[in-house]
Amino acid sequence: MNYQQVLDWMFAQLPMYQRQGQTAFKKDLTNIIALCDELGNPQKKFKTIHVGGTNGKGSTSHMIASILQEAGYKVGLYTSPHLKNFTERIRINGKEISKDAVIDFIEKNKIFLEKQGLSFFEMTVGMAFEEFANQKVDIAVIEVGLGGRLDSTNIIIPEVSVITNIGLDHTQFLGETLPEIAFEKAGIIKKNIPVVIGERQKETENVFIAKAEDCKAPIIFASDTMQNYATDLLGDYQKHNVTTAVTAIQQLKEYKVTEENIKNGLLNVVKNTNLKGRWQILQEHPKVICDTAHNKEGLFYTLQQLKKENYKQLHIVLGVVSDKNLSEILPMFPKNAKYYFCKPNIPRGLSADELQEQANEFGLIGEVFVSINQAFGKSKISASDEDVIYIGGSTFVVAEIL
């Protein structure tokens, strides 16, 4: 098989959560355990940091990786979903896994993967573990896919566990309340392994404290001591992620990381890890900003920041996935903007007509477009040099314009 055929085959296996939604959610770890046994348990051959949470886990993972790279370590980074290329999910010192390595892994293990009925996400996690072991990384930063307790990544024993914060997202899998969701996320807390909680929230802190006590795991709430470092990741919300990342680094007893490494790591996240889509400014005149924020808590910070921009007219290219609670997020959007409604090109995308209809109820007025690129194209034609165009609502909207 060539690379494209391999990807097509992977996507065609048990549904991919990002594309399909609920049908792809796995309720236990038997498959990933079986796969790792088959591979000779590569996850036991390198050290890890495990990063979960509702918002900011991607940015925090990239920050931690960047700091460790600045300290001279060979650092694996596993994140999801990808924006443009599948290989973004598995990187070492910012360099994506080779297409040949992806082909080799699938061809070598295809019979087992089919027989075991592994999902797209499960096989990708196994691929990451094998790549990091083969390339002999000093440490790997592993981002949780969804939840924590039952996530395929949750078979590692990390040096430190990190949970950024808890918000209402993926409630159909993780629970309808913040404490229920916190319980799922707390599943990555391990016996005697320190855990860093990014933000102390009164609804969830007791869930984490109880789980940490149960596991005899030292618990640190990063937000109790805010860290004041600059970062090249734009977006006011990044200050929370900076604090979480630095606090996590401080728990690594066996790694030598200087103050200078921390500073440079945070200033060079994009250069070191190639992170995209976080308050990313694509052009000036008109200013075009894209951001992957897609739930109530994430959008709160992003839309607050949008208010600080100077413009004659604000244009918003908006698309969402169908399992979002729109009555929670649409009221947060500004009524004085001109909207360009579109559907992300995945099965899980919400139709642009339906989005327009629901948005109208909250006083958000605009046109419907058949694609994200058409919507973005029209916004650029309509905008003057003094205007601002914001593109967002879903990771998958941003992915299509990058």
Image (spheres, grey):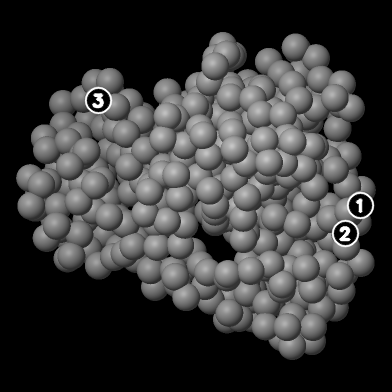
Observer able to see residue 254: yes
Question: Where is residue 24 drawn, in percent x and y?
Answer: 52, 72
Q: Is residue 162 above or below residue 257?
A: below
Q: Splitting the image into 4 quarters, where does residue 108 fall? A: bottom right
Nearest to the observer: residue 310 or residue 347:
347
Query: In the rendered structure, which amino acid carries the disc numbered 1?
Result: Lys
Contact, CB < 8 Å: mark 1 with mark 2? yes
Question: Where is residue 63 drawn, in percent x and y?
Answer: 64, 31
Rounded to the nearest whole Å, what is the CA distance between mark 1 and mark 2? 5 Å
For mark 3, what is the residue? 307
**Mark on residue 42?**
2
Query: Which residue is painted at 17% across and 42% down in the image?
Result: 331
- Which numbered disc, 3 or 2, marks the residue that appears first in the sequence? 2
Quarter placement of the N terminus: bottom right
Query: In the rendered structure, which amino acid carries the disc numbered 2?
Result: Pro
Quick one: label 1, few (<14), some, or many (20+) residues within 10 Å?
Answer: some
Quick one: label 3, few (<14), some, or many (20+) residues within 10 Å?
Answer: few
**SS type, badge 2:** helix
Q: Splitting the image into 4 quarters, where does residue 4 fall? A: bottom right
**SS type, badge 3:** helix
Q: Splitting the image into 4 quarters, where does residue 221 fall? A: top right
Query: Which residue is painted at 72% across and 29% down in the image?
Result: 218
Query: In the rendered structure, which amino acid carries the disc numbered 3?
Result: Lys
